[in-house]
Structure formats: structure tokens, C-alpha cells
Amino acid sequence: MMSFNMEWLRLCRDKLKDNGTIWISGTYHNIFSVANCLTELGYKILNVIIWEKTNPPVNISCRYFKYSTEFVIWARKMQKVPHKFNYELMKELNDGKQMTDVWRMPAIGRWEKTCGKHPTQKPLRLLVRTILASTNQGDWILDPFSGSSTTGIAANLCGRRFAGLEQEEEFCKLSKARREEMDNLASFDNLISHIEDLKKLQDYSMVNESISGYIQTPF
């Protein structure tokens, strides 16, 4: 596991701009290995976000505490090169208060599985927030483990450009179906209606021109 993490994180670091950042989500099974590799490769860890699931699955065995969290590491490429952080936007989305490193969000909903489901699919809410926090309109986002392209869908919704890598043809087809679904205005509006940060952005953009470019319509 350690050698695999070292290799893909090294390759990602080669592709990152000097002021670029990387987000990695995971559970305790792998996230500590990832953190060690990031440090060895020269990344600077900025935060370890705790994603607290508001609807965690039941622990059927009843032999340990119910799993209700995942971790998301946010790290930048260079130790001394400043990174992008849309601090004021995050504060605005948090009702004028500094956003903490504990994010309470549900796991994926039924509305995110209309085209099918990936076994480790992440909620759009989570990816939208990471993208809004650390990128600007038109920036490129790379996901080396694209899966069903939740990162890509979130990037499109936020007006960013996206490149994803996925070796399973089944999931590539699922990604394509999900992206095409967005071209339907009703489906697009349905996605927005379920994502709290994007709903807030829509409301704010009506009265604040400075953030009106954060959300991208499909037409």
C-alpha cells in the first residue's frame, strides 16, 4: 500500500502547478499511509477535514462503534509557495463565520444514483465544497481515480475544467451517462437543488456580482 501511494502521489505532484493543491479522501484503512507519503514527497498538509456523515450506515455486528466519519486531506505541492484558498467565499457559505475542518454532510442520496452507483461514490456536496474552496473559474481539475466522475460533475457544476482517469469501462460509461444527464435543464436544476453550497451561491449571486461566476449553467 505504501509503495502504491508513493507512486501515484509522486505522479500527481509532477502534474500540479506550484501553487496547486490536492484533496484525498479515505478511511482509517489508508489515510494514514497517504499522510506519511505526502510528507515524504514534500507536500505541505494544510488540513485534515473530518467528514461527519449525518446518515451513517448501521453497524450490524454490534462489536464496535458505528462508523460515521471519513477523512479528507488537503495538501499543497510546495512548502513555501502560497496556495489558492477562497476564504471569503467559504466564510460566506458558512453564514459569515470561519468554516471549520468538520463538515457535516449526508452520504450519497438516491438523487445521485439515477444512472447507477459506484461502490465508493462520494457525495456531490463534498466535492463541490473542495472545488469551491481551492480553485477559480476555468481552472483544471485532475482526478486520477475518476470512478463515476463525481469530481467531474462537481467541476462542471462549478464552471471548472476536468480531466479524469479510469481503467474500468463500466464506470467510464456511468460517468458519460451522468454528464449527459446534466444537459437536461430539469436534471441540472435537480442537482443544484440538493447541494446546499450551490443553492446558497445562486442566492448570493443575485445580489453580489463578485461571486456570480462560481456557478456554471449547462446552456
Image (cartoon, helix red, strand yellow):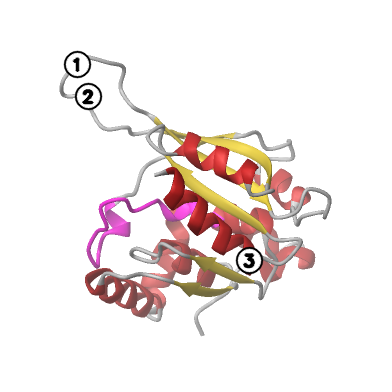
Q: Residue at x 24, y 74 (%)?
A: 169
Q: Of residues 177 and 167, which is closer to you in this image?
A: 167
Q: Is residue 115 visible?
A: yes
Determine the secondary structure under disc 3: helix
Determine the secondary structure under disc 1: loop
Q: Is residue 197 visible?
A: no
Q: Is 25 drawn above or below residue 182 in the view shown?
A: above
Q: Residue at x 55, y 63 (%)?
A: 11
Q: Of residues 186 and 31, which is closer to you in this image?
A: 31
Determine the secondary structure under disc 2: loop
From the top left corner, tell me how far across and down residue 175 is, in percent. 33, 72
Question: Given this view, does label 3 or label 1 mark the residue nearer the observer?
Answer: 3
Q: Residue at x 40, y 51 (%)?
A: 123
Give the mark nearer the N terminus: 3 vs 1: 3
Residue 14: mark in rendering: 3
Label 1, label 2: how many angstroms apart (C-alpha)? 6 Å
Q: Is residue 178 left or right of residue 189?
A: left
| Crowd rating for badge 1 (residues with CA inside 10 Å; few <14, some 14–19, many 20+) | few
Q: Which residue is mark 2?
A: 59
Please give the range of residues in magenta. 110-128
Residue 62: mark in rendering: 1
Q: Residue at x 66, y 72 (%)?
A: 139
